[in-house]
């Protein structure tokens, strides 16, 4: 196969190690191939070797073998041990090249391997694992067209159970989570997708949904925006409250300051009910140590709140109420977050879900922000042990599928 894209060798990091070529042992340093100190070519991680403007797979150069590490420090041998297909791969909408079973990006980063039967392995550069085997829980929509290692033309397709081929992984996950999503109005869909995207794209939604159940609209007892069944974890949202939240979100963004019956006291509210209820489900999936940490953070804040802005004596609720002057120095992301450690966590999850309130949370409560950041970027640090393997495998796949990107949290 000829070179599929022209990439400036210097712009990508190649592997480091030794290259056997025409009986010589050459040094490779971040892709740059040296012979007696002089650069003579460039080796890409996916096994393409570039020499005097010709780029071809290492298999096409007789007797050429590379041994060393890739740009992430994972051991790499080229050609790789097993033969595999060659062709074009569309993975969750991302175009990739497969060369003799090696899956590379258009700029020749090695991201995985593929076998002749369609089995996909991801090269997890974050957790430094050379081959993470995918299954139907972790593999994203896969379309391949090319030939098998024996040259036979081959078309292959994998679509996840109950998934829609034309939609991204995260959209599909949100649709699966929110029962009867199709019946929502356009503005409602937009609201749900906007506030759940970060959880879907990071794989956290899938893991929580499988453990705790999904979310549906229904009639919840008057006055509560939503409840999470303690035993089942299923979420039911009140239809009317859901509508109200969307109107408030459209008007004021993720948070709003509202007046209370206790003049001149005000209460801050977060208008992200779907993410809030999801937060209760997520709490069940956190390790005991993380749950204890959240409890301690909550307790410390309540204490401080009691001294800094005690509640008016005639008020019987538990929310943080503030005079207009106190609003900028509030201690909780919302008034309701003060009412219990569970509501504190759920309101922080809600706030973390969209950019403006996430930025505010980072300043207001950096410790809880750090835990939430770990849920998305290092779930193994904060989730229960039973979820580790699934979430890490899924996340390695989501990175290749361009869902879990560096700018998901920006
Ligand atoms: Zn709640």
Image: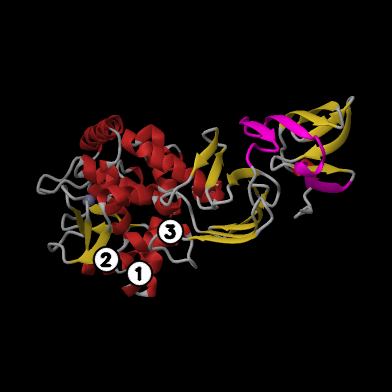
Q: Position of residue 287 (x, y in %)?
A: 30, 34
Secondary structure category for the residue under label 2: helix
Label of residue 160 in the image? 3
- Residue 253 seen anywhere in this rendered image of the structure: no
Who's the residue at 31% across and 52% down the image? 209
Q: Position of residue 379 (x, y in %)?
A: 40, 38
- Closer to the chain start, of discs 3 and 1, is 3
- Closer to the chain start, of discs 3 and 2, is 3
Q: On the picture, is 398 further left or further right than 172?
A: right
Question: Would you call the spot at circle 2 few (<14 residues within 10 Å), some (14-19), or many (20 or more)?
Answer: some
Label of residue 175 in the image? none
Secondary structure category for the residue under label 3: loop
Label of residue 242 in the image? 2
Question: Would you call the spot at circle 3 few (<14 residues within 10 Å), some (14-19), or many (20 or more)?
Answer: some
Who's the residue at 15% across and 62% down the image? 220
Q: Position of residue 135 (x, y in %)?
A: 44, 48
Tell me how far mark 3 sits from mark 1, CA to CA.
25 Å
Label of residue 188 in the image? 1
Which image quarter: residue 187? Answer: bottom left
Tell me how far mark 3 sits from mark 2, CA to CA.
30 Å
Question: Would you call the spot at circle 1 few (<14 residues within 10 Å), some (14-19), or many (20 or more)?
Answer: some
Q: Is residue 62 magenta?
A: yes
């Amino acid at each position: 196969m000829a070179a599929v894209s022209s990439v400036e060798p210097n712009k990508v990091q190649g592997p480091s190690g030794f290259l056997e070529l025409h009986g010589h042992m050459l040094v490779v340093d971040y892709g740059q191939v040296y012979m007696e100190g002089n650069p003579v070519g460039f080796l890409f991680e996916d096994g393409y070797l570039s020499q005097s403007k010709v780029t071809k797979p290492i298999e096409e150069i007789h007797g050429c073998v590379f041994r060393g590490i890739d740009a992430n420090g994972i051991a790499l041998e080229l050609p790789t041990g097993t033969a595999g297909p060659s062709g074009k791969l569309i993975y969750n909408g991302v175009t990739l090249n497969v060369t003799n079973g090696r899956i590379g990006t258009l700029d020749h980063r090695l991201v995985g391997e593929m076998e002749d039967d369609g089995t996909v392995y991801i090269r997890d550069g974050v957790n430094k694992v050379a081959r993470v085997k995918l299954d139907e829980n972790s593999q994203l929509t896969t379309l391949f067209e090319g030939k098998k290692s024996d040259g036979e033309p081959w078309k292959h397709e994998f679509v996840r159970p109950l998934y829609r081929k034309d939609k991204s992984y995260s959209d599909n996950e949100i649709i699966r989570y929110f029962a009867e999503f199709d019946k929502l109005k356009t503005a409602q869909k937009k609201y749900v997708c906007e506030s759940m995207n970060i959880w879907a794209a990071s794989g956290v939604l899938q893991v929580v949904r499988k453990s705790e159940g999904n979310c549906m609209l229904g009639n919840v007892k008057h006055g509560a925006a939503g409840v999470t069944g303690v035993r089942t974890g299923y979420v039911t949202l009140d239809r009317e409250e859901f509508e109200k939240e969307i109107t408030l979100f459209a008007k004021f963004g993720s948070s709003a300051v509202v007046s209370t019956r206790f003049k001149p006291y005000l209460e801050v509210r977060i208008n992200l009910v779907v993410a809030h209820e999801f937060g209760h489900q997520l709490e069940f999936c956190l390790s005991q140590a993380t749950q204890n940490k959240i409890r301690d953070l909550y307790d410390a804040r309540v204490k401080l709140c009691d001294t800094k802005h005690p509640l008016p004596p005639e008020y019987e609720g538990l929310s943080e109420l503030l005079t207009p002057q106190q609003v900028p120095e509030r201690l909780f992301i919302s008034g309701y977050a003060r009412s219990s450690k569970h509501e504190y966590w759920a309101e922080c999850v809600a706030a973390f879900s969209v950019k403006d309130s996430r930025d505010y949370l980072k300043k207001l409560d950096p410790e809880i922000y750090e835990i939430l950041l770990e849920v998305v970027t290092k779930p193994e640090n904060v989730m229960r042990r039973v979820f580790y393997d699934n979430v890490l495998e899924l996340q390695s796949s989501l990175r290749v599928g361009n869902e879990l990107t560096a700018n998901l949290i920006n």
